[in-house]
Amino acid sequence: MGDIAGYSGIVTVVRACYLLSVVIILLVRLTPSLRDRFLQYGARETRQTGPATQADGQDQTPTTLLTRQLDKIAAVRVPHSAFWHFYAFSIACTSLSIVAVGLNLLAIGEERGDNSDSSGNSNGKLEVSTLARAALCLSLMGCQGIRRLWECISQSRGGPSTSSMWIGHYLIGMAFYACVNLGILAEHLRSLSVLGSTEAADGGVLLGRGLGVWVQTTAFAGFVAASWKQHVYHRYLASLKKYTLPAEGAFRIIVAPHYTAECVIYLALAILSAPAGGKFNVTILYALAFTIVNLGTTADGTKRWMLVKFSENRKEIERRWKMIPGLF
């Protein structure tokens, strides 16, 4: 099934990428010169894209040179419509991960086919169960990618759009979806490597997994419900005229309830994709932390933009939670 060190290394790298991304986002958010250049996009973009001019013919200072370099970096942008690339890429990553699960199942069949030892059969059952769970969670991730891709295509507004996003957002988004799929797969393969090197089953009793059947069932229901609600929110937003204040349903109390749904989706995946012997898929918890910080930062920017754009509704907007009711 592979060596423990190899899969542990993959898991460590994926977690480190999420953690580093969280630190970078918070650093950019707390630094005005970086925030104005790299966090604002679409309707909220107020950054001046033209070249800076030097007043009175004065020589450039180191600060001005740095500013110019930051402007050049921030000017590397892609159309906001390229969001569909994220979901097409996620579907491709999911497909490859499911193929990897299938290959491992075939390998198990070859290894266990002639083994009549009861302990070996017990281990084989756990291996199949673990890979089946990985396949299920990858399938859920695939459904998420397919739904979001369909929404991007079917709910896109007619006519050309001038909205854009910084290339860094684009690359981070691509890396995020690759790491989610890899996090589900690598965590389960690592648990099987541990199983292969230790006595992980005794007398046919399989390793414990997850938080219990009722919690897992609730997590599955939560994934489905959050996916449906997010689709409803996206459909509602697509129906609004451009730069209209959302004011129906959950949007009356939350600035970005579609972000709330996204957080629920990844929390559910973290519970459902718990590897053998674990309560959660810790790597997906890292992905959830990244999602909360990333979308929370965006929701904060959206609320600030709303307060300026729809100043006549300022009091009503101020009462709205940004993303997580009762907390943020």
Image: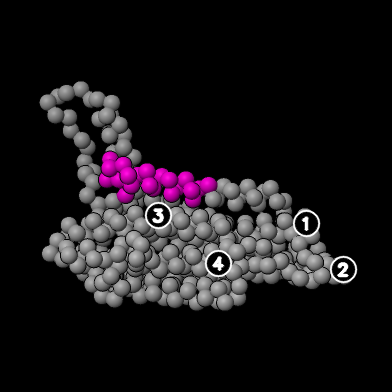
> Where, by quadrant of the figure, is residue 236 drawn?
bottom left
The span from disc 2 to disc 3 (Cα, nearest Å) is 49 Å
Name the residue carrying label 2: 117
The span from disc 3 to disc 1 (Cα, nearest Å) is 38 Å
Q: Amino acid at mark 4?
A: Ile
Residue at 55%, 56% in the rendered image: 283
Q: Which residues are magenta?
A: 16-39
Name the residue carrying label 3: 293
- Marks 3,1: beta carbons within 8 A: no
Location of the C terminus (image quadrant): bottom left
Name the residue carrying label 1: 198
In front: label 1 or label 2: 1
> Where, by quadrant of the figure, is residue 323 drawn?
bottom left
Residue at 63%, 47% in the rendered image: 9
Residue 32 covered by magenta stretch: yes
First in sequence: mark 2 or mark 4? 2
- Marks 1,4: beta carbons within 8 A: no
Q: Amino acid at mark 1?
A: Thr
Please give left or right for residue 263 compared with residue 247 in the image.
right
x and y, in percent, of residue 282 in the image = 56, 57
The span from disc 4 to disc 3 (Cα, nearest Å) is 20 Å
First in sequence: mark 4 or mark 3? 4
- Find numbered disc 4 in the image and state the secondary structure of the residue it sits on: helix
Location of the N terminus (image quadrant): bottom right
Name the residue carrying label 4: 271
Q: Amino acid at mark 2?
A: Asp
Residue 292 covered by magenta stretch: no
Pointer 4: residues within 10 angstroms few (<14), some, or many (20+)? Answer: many
Residue at 38%, 66% in the rendered image: 260
